[in-house]
Structure formats: structure tokens, C-alpha cells
Image (cartoon, grey):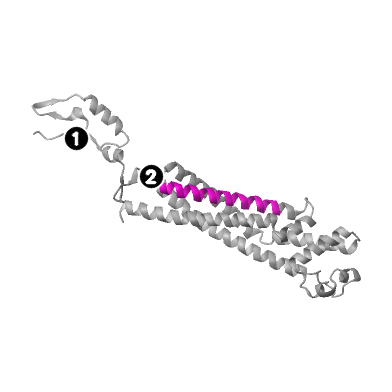
Amino acid sequence: MQSWSRVRVAKCQLLVTSSFVLLLGLSMAAMAAVNYLGTHFAVVGRASSDRTPYEATRRWAFCTSISLAGLLTLGAVLGAVATVREAGGLMAGGFLCFALAFCILVQVAFWRFHNPAQVEDAVLDTYDLVYDQAVRGSSVTLRQQLVAIQDTFLCCGKNSPFGLLGGTEVSLCPGEEATRQDCLVGVRSFLRTYGNIASTLTGIGLASTVYAVLLSSFLWFAFRSGCSLDRRGKYTLSRRARDCRPQEPSFFRRSPGGPALQHPMEADVLDGRLCASRPSGGPQFLQDS
């Protein structure tokens, strides 16, 4: 495959990858909104204090999701615009965004691997605390918070390890609410579903950013080398890169009338300055005419 064909294929692939990364960034933003404004997480947040591990984990997840969404969206836009305009500076910006997003995704994947149940434990600890305080105390506010959590997760109470429930515990699940599932099971099921979605997006993001980094770096080098699209739809070197070919110094050229060497002219000196970026192949002597 010729060089211009490889550039064209890389541009098409980067445009498709940028569109996919843009959708991924929007998905990350949606997850951040669900994490901060979603009903399930918000009702648990209202029942917990600011010093609990749940609030710290919730803030960290929100900031990470927003950062990833911004980097992925910005990288996708810069990559697409740079591909269309063949701008090396914009392509470098897209490469940087993709690289930073990849680093954050690696940290998220490492955290998920070593702490798979951290969010689940934080939410269950918050529910246990609210449940115990509502059972032992007579605060109306705590009971309302507990009822709100149970109505949101469609659960009621938690099973006693001894199989017997006190009168206060039974009163928390009156009527049809007593037939609902155990709250520990319901909360755990919801969080595992949410965690699986987050892990899937993280894996897709890692693969997408790696591919985008490779494509953007290749196209950046192609644009920097002067490869451009002509009117016939073929990629060729720019005029300056094509004209700056190795030339022999004029003072080594023989004159037509004899072996006397010619002095370098002003035009030759200027031509040598313009083409200084291309190393010459060494002084060469012309044959006698």
C-alpha cells in the first residue's frame, strides 16, 4: 500500500474513532450525572453525613467521570477537526487529550481490580447505620430517610441472623412492603449492575484511546512531513518538500570552457538556505561536456 493510501485510510479510521470516542465521552457524562443526581445515589447521600466513606467515594467517582468525559469529548473534536483540516497543531492537542484520558482510565481499571466492592460496602454501611438508628431511636427524620431508601430500591428491612424480628423492625415494613426483598440484597444487586456498566465503559475506553493515540501520532507525523491532498484526491509531498532536493554545491561545478571552478552565486546560496532542512548526498562532480 502506498503512503498516500495509508494516510487516507488512517484519516477515515480516526474520523470513525473520534465519533465513537465522542459517544463514549457523552456516556461518561451521563454516568457522572447519574452518580450525582440519580435517585438511588441521591437518597443514600441525603441519609449519610459528609464524613462517611460513601460521600468521599461519590465525590471521587463524580470528578473522575467528569474529567474523563471532558478529555474524551475534547480529544474527539480536536481529532476530527485536525483530520479534516490536516492541522498538525490540532492533531497534537487531540493526541494529548487521548493520552491523558488513557492514563486516567488505567488508574480507574487498577482501582476497580483491587477494590471491586468499595462502593458497595460504602452504600451498605450507610444503610446499616440508618437502619440501626431508626430501629433503636424514635427520630421521625431517620425513619423518613429509611423509608425513602427502601421505596427507592424497592426493598424493606434486612433479615435477622436469628430469624426473629422485633416489634420495631416489623413496624418498618407494614402490609405489602413486608413481601419485598431484603434491602441488603436489593442494594447489592443494583450496585453490581451499575459497576458492570462502569467496567464495560472503562474497557471500551481503554481500547478506543489506545487506537486513537496510534492514529493521531501517525497522522501528526504525516502532516509534519508535508503530505497533503491534491485536486485529484492523491496525497503528495508539498511543493517546498518536493523542491528541496539534494543539490551539489555550485563551486564544485566545472565551467563549460575549462576546468576552472565557478564561485557560488547569490541565487545558489539562497537556494541552499531554503533546502537546508534536507541533507545533501555529498559533493558530486559533473562530467565534462
The numbered mark, 1 or 2, whose residue comes first in the sequence reads 2
Main secondary-structure element of the magenta-colored stretch: helix
User: Where in the figure is residue 79, as x and y percent of width and height?
Assistant: 47, 49
The foreground one among 96 and 173 is 173
Mark 2 lies on a secondary structure that is: helix
Asked if the magenta segment contains residue 81, the reply would be yes
Q: Position of residue 262 (x, y in %)?
A: 16, 25
For residue 284, the mark is 1
Q: Could you say which is closer to the camera, residue 258 or residue 102?
A: 102
- Segment colored magenta: 57-84
Compared across the picture, whether 237 is left or right of 185 comes to left
Q: Would you place residue 251 above or below residue 197 in this image?
A: above
Residue 124 location in percent, x, y? 76, 62
Residue identifier under label 2: 223
* Three-letter code for the amino acid on which mark 2 is drawn: Phe
The quarter of the picture where residue 35 lies is bottom right
Q: Is residue 179 above or below residue 248?
A: below
Magenta segment includes 184: no
